[in-house]
Amino acid sequence: MLKKKVEDICNRQVEREGYSSNLYLAMAAWAENEGFSGVADWLYAQAEEERIHFLKFIRYINERGGKVLIPAFKKPPAEFKGVGEMFREVLKHEEFITASINEIVALTLSEKDFNTHNFLLWFVMEQVEEEKNARAILDKLRLVGKNNMYQFDRDIMSLRIPSQPPPVA
Ligand code: OFO
């Protein structure tokens, strides 16, 4: 059975993972509209991964006899100043999620909830991967500069380091 404190922080993460999915959907829709189809594909795929993270937390809470609260989500931005600025936002958001996951890890240690701790290890590794992907894209953007966005848009799918989608439960 989940302790209340752990249940609450896992529900907070349900909201954050769901918001991540919506944020990347908003970015994907914007990029598609601007004609960056490669960037849009990358972000649509990323939105799907976030939805899997969202579901993993939901199902874990239920599995441990907790109560899931499906939240209302804040509206993500609809406009972005450019692809570079958008990917800086992606990295910032992933760093925020990493800090959020680490906070849950710390709580599970102080509460001696080793089952939840174990559940979180996959997310700890996933965050390393997600930050790395966002940094790789920003590096590439710096290299191509403003003049070769077409080439960047073609290249971005090969920058996606395929991570196996986890089983939902
Ligand atoms: Fe981007 O890893 Fe979940 O949120």
Image (tube, rainbow, N blue to C red):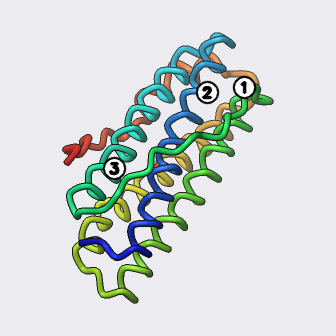
> First in sequence: mark 2 or mark 3?
2
In this figure, which residue is indicated by the disc labeled 3? 58
Image spot of residue 93 (x, y percent): 61, 51
Q: Is residue 89 above or below residue 3?
A: above
Q: Which residue occupies 45% across, 58% down?
A: 11
Measure the alpha-carbon separation of dots 2 and 3: 22 Å
- Are dots 2 and 3 in contact, CB under 8 Å? no
- Are dots 2 and 1 in contact, CB under 8 Å? yes
- The kind of residue on which mark 1 rests is Ala
Label 3 or label 1, whichever lies nearer to me, is 3
* Numbered tag placed on residue 78 in the rendering: 1
Image spot of residue 137 (x, y percent): 56, 40
Image spot of residue 92 (x, y percent): 65, 53
In this figure, which residue is indicated by the disc labeled 2? 26
In this rendering, the count of numbered labels is 3
Observer-nearest of 38 and 140: 38
- The kind of residue on which mark 2 rests is Ala
Q: Secondary structure at mark 2?
A: helix
Density class for disc 3 (Cα within 10 Å; few <14, some 14-19, many ≥20) is many
> First in sequence: mark 3 or mark 1?
3
Q: Which residue occupies 53% across, 42% down?
A: 20
